[in-house]
Amino acid sequence: MKNSRIIILAFVLYTLLSCSTNEPSNYTTWHCVESSESGSRIYLINIYKAEKDTNTYLISNFHNISYEGDYDVIVKKNNNNLTFITEQIGSSQFVIKSPTGTVNANFTQMTLDYNIYNMDDKSEIGYHVVYSR
């Protein structure tokens, strides 16, 4: 009787663990303060942590562009530095140029600097952004 309970428990645990998906886990909503020569604005973003690569983060609503579908921007964390994997924001006409970024040790604040190139009107504006949670 005891052995059958252990086998059943092991089977249930195996089933639950094998059903996990590759979906990213929500890393909460962050507060964004964005500054440029055009002024400043405040909005919210979501940052998700990829399950398979704990140093990869997926950002939705990057640059306050609500993009339906996957994530707007993908960044990789190496120590306290962030590297942008994505160049184009979602399916928009905006391209990220010269991106740099850092994150503090306890992952509660990110600082990003980048230029946004608008493919429609061929303009480029520099941004300084602070994300906090």
Image: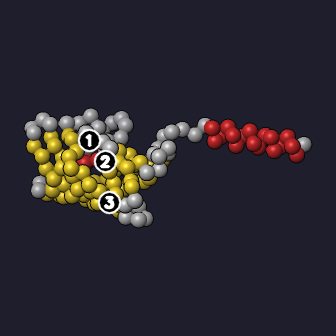
- Measured along the vertical axis of the image, is residue 104 above or below residue 66? below
- Marks 1 and 2, Cα distance to the nearest angstrom? 7 Å
- Marks 3 and 2, Cα distance to the nearest angstrom? 11 Å
Q: Nearer the viewer, residue 64 or 48?
A: 48
Disc 3: which residue: 102
Q: Residues within 10 Å of mark 3 (few under 14, many from 20)?
A: some
Q: Are marks 3 and 2 in contact (CB under 8 Å)?
A: no
- Of callouts 3 and 2, the N-terminal one: 2
| Quarter of the figure that contains the C terminus | bottom left
Q: Secondary structure at mark 2?
A: strand
Residue at the spot 9% in from the left edge and 38% down from the top edge: 121
Disc 2: which residue: 84
Q: Amino acid at mark 3?
A: Thr
Q: Which x, y percent locates residue 43?
A: 28, 54
Disc 1: which residue: 87
- Measured along the vertical axis of the image, is residue 79 above or below residue 94? below
